[in-house]
Amino acid sequence: MILFRTEACRVEPGGFCRARFLAALLKPGHSVQVSENRDRPPRSKPPPDGETPLDTRRLERFAEEGLACVVFDLERFSPEDNRLITWCRENKIATVCFAGPLAIPKPVDYVIDCDPAAPGRYPSGQKGLFGTEFAVLHHRFRHFHMISRRYRTKIDRIIWILGPGIPYRLTRRLVDVLLRYGFKVKIHPATFLKRAHLKGLKRRYPNLRITGKPETLARPLFEADLALLSPGSHLFEAAACGTPAIMLVSNGKEGEIARSFSKHRLGSLSSPGWEKDPGVLVQQIRDFEADSFSEMGRCGKEKVDGRGAYRVRDFIADLHA
């Protein structure tokens, strides 16, 4: 049996749950179970019985059912998860962990990290899958990756994928500047924009386009000439579609991640001061040469082909065998 540990959160429009997607790929021929992390922030009183995210008393039952591998896809490990890792180590059960950018690795057997600079962050004896070819994306990105695309000489269509840490006033200012310069702008608000603010943007800027609630962002990214996004999973989605990207950095940690991605030509780092003066970002977009952003798009397609989920599936299936 293969056990997946994932966050208990609602999947945002245009996104998908990586653990559940892999579990669906492994279900034919494998016994798979998904356990959500419903742990709550620390509080003064202890939680009542039965509210723990994973009951360690069930571990013996997992052993009886033939548990062979545990896959962690968590942002924060609870005490129950740490006890589960210790129990797996004592019973010689393989543990796999998805690592985020600049994340502190947990003491697991295998690490899956799609950051291009991942191998240098781990000890020499750490086993796992490292590289952009192991980025787990929705299967539709694989289809759009196979389509050959032609790049315009000038950037016309821009898609902005909103991320955390960008206030509404800055969003409105940047949208206003981009539309005034004649760009065709489409935004993907996801869950980072209130409904009232979204209605206000539609009323104030009738030419602004909204992605709505798509299953994936494969088609909107493929149709765009340039993507504005935060350094993260959406960057790999844009690379799979061959769409050049500018990473909007709002804090120091994102700056380190963005510089790592920029060195490998997966995206371009935003000009400093764009938050105070959106015109700086517009000038950076206009200064993009046709050869520069077309080369970035082709480089992204070479590094991310959209088949990472199937490589990870085969790797986990081999551990289960």
Image: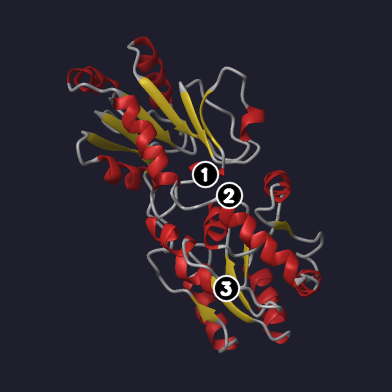
Where is residue 268 shown, x and y percent of the image?
Answer: 72, 58
Instruction: Using residue 257 as the reference point, say whether residue 2 is left or right of it.
Output: left
Where is residue 307 shown, x and y percent of the image?
Answer: 43, 49
Given residues 178 and 266, the one toward you in this image is 266
Query: How many numbered tags mark residues here?
Result: 3
Label number found at residue 236: none
User: Disc 3 vs disc 2: which is toward the camera?
Assistant: 2
Which residue position holds label 1? 133
Compute the Cα span from label 3 to label 2.
19 Å
Where's the C terminus, which quadrant? top left
Please, what is the three-letter code of the amino acid marked with disc 1?
Glu
Can residue 235 be seen here? The reply is no
Label number found at residue 303: 2
Q: Image quarter for residue 103? A: top right
Which residue position holds label 3? 224
Please, what is the three-letter code of the amino acid marked with disc 3?
Ala
216 to 77, vertically: above or below: below
Task: Please name the residue shown 69% across and 62% down the image.
Answer: 295
Label whose residue precedes the other's in the sequence (3 or 2): 3
Compute the Cα span from label 2 to label 1.
6 Å
261 to 272, vertically: above or below: above
